[in-house]
Image: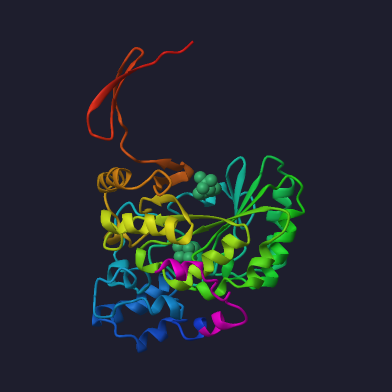
Amino acid sequence: MTSDANLKQPAIATGTAWQADVRAGVRHVRDLDRLPLSPAERAAAQAAAASHKVRVPKPYLDLIDWDDPNDPIRAQVIPSPDELIAAEGELGDPIGDHAYSPVPRLTHRHADRVLLFPTYQCAVYCRFCFRKESLTSIGRGYTRDALEPALAYIAGHPEIREVILTGGDPLSLPDKALAEIRARIEAIPHMRLLRIHTRVPVALPSRITAGLVAALQGRLMVTVVTHFNHPREITPDAETACRTMRQAGFVLLNQSVLLKGVNDHVEVLEELCRELMYRLGVKPYYLHHGDLARGMAHRRTTIAEGQALVAELRQRLSGICNPTYVIDLPDGGGKVPLAASHIEGRDGETWRIRGQDGKVRDYREVVG
Ligand SMILES: *Cc1c(COP(=O)(O)O)cnc(C)c1O
Ligand code: SF4
C-alpha cells in the first residue's frame, strides 16, 4: 500500500453489494458441496453443522487458500472432524452467561454494563465460537417485542452506562432494526455508550455502508469492537469499512481469540496487532485465551504458551499496539488478565521487579 493509496478516498460501499456477497457465499451446510473440501471435512460437515451452523460470506471465502489444508482462514469457518470430539471439562456455556441473565436477551454481570442480544444470528459462523450452543439452541432473530423486557430492565437500572450489542452479530441486522434499537437505547437517560461487538467488518465488509453507519449515529458515543484474528483478514475492503466507521466518529477496538494453528505464532500476532492499529486505526483491545467451548480442544493453546507469546509481543510492539491477554472465567468469574507478572517478590517497601530486559531490579516505595 503506497501513501498515495492511503490518501485516496475509497468509495463507501452502498446499496446492496453486500447482499450479493451473502448470496454468493456459503449459506447452508449443503453449499459446502461446491467447495474443495477434504474427505474428512466433507464427512464431518453434516454432524458438525448440527451443533453449530455453517455460514461464510463470499469475501471471507475468497481469502481461503484451498491448496493449504491448514489455512488459518479455512480453520476458522470450515467444519472440522475434530469439532465432534468433546473433551472432558469443556462446557456448553463456557463463561457462565446464563446465570447472570435476569431477563431474556440480556446478561448483567458488571454493574455499569450489560450485554444485549438483539439477534442470535451471525453473518459468519466461527467454528470456535464460545456462544455456539446458544446460537444453535436459540437461533432466533430480532423482533421489537423480544427486546422489550431487556430494555425495561436497562431503563430500571440507572447504574448501567454501557449497552453492548452482541449475539449473534448485531451488524447482521437491517439498518432499520439497528436504528430502532439505537433509538430505544439512547432514549434511556442514563445511557452513555453504545458498544457493538461484531465480525462483520472482517467477514462481510461491504455491509458497512453509509446507511448502516447513519443508523447507529445519535446521542451516544459509539464504540465498535471488531474481531480480527489473522493479518490476512486485513484486506482493502476491511480497510474501507473501518475508515467509514472512523470517519463517522466511532471508536474502533479489536478483540482476537488465541487459536492454535491460526494465530499462535508471535510473527502472526505481531503483524495482526500492528496492521490493526497502523492500517485500520483499530486499537488491539483483548486477546482472549480460548474458551472451553465444546469440541475446540484442537484450537486451544496452553496458558503458558499464551503468556510466552504476549511477553514477546510486549517486547516487539508499542503500548498502543498491545492487546491485554485475558481469560473469561467459567461460572461468570469475568475477564481477568493472564500475562505473567513482572513482580518477583517483595520485602517490606522494596519490590523486586523484572524489567523488560529480563533483569530484576529493586524498587523502593517512597510515599508521603
Ligand atoms: C466481556 C463482557 C463485558 C465487557 O467487558 P469489558 O471488560 O468492558 O470489555 C461485559 N459483560 C459481560 C457479561 C462480558 O462477558
Ligand atoms: S460472529 Fe461472533 S457470535 Fe457469531 S459465530 Fe463468530 S464468534 Fe460467535
Horizontal relation, residue 118 to residue 84: left or right: right
- Up/down of 137 relative to 314, above or below: below
Picture coordinates of residue 340 (x, y %)?
A: 30, 37
Picture coordinates of residue 47 (x, y %)?
A: 36, 75
Does the magenta segment cover residue 8?
yes
| Residue 136 appearing in the image | no
- Residue drawn at (35%, 74%), measured in percent from left and top? 78
| Residue farthest toward the front in the current orientation of the protein | 4
- Up/down of 184 relative to 52, above or below: above
- Up/down of 33 relative to 44, above or below: below
Picture coordinates of residue 15 (x, y %)?
A: 62, 81
Picture coordinates of residue 60 (x, y %)?
A: 42, 75
Which quarter shows the N terminus? bottom left
Horizontal relation, residue 357 to residue 200: left or right: left
Does the magenta segment cover residue 131?
no
Q: Quadrant of residue 230?
A: bottom left
Q: Quadrant of residue 91?
A: bottom left
Specify how the rendered protein is coloured.
Answer: rainbow
Front residue (pair 271, 114): 271
| Residue 163 appearing in the image | yes
Horizontal relation, residue 20 to residue 45: left or right: right
Q: Quadrant of residue 215?
A: bottom right
- Residue drawn at (36%, 13%), measured in percent from left and top? 349
Front residue (pair 51, 246): 246
Span highlighted in magenta in the image: 1-20
- Residue drawn at (26%, 63%), measured in percent from left and top? 261
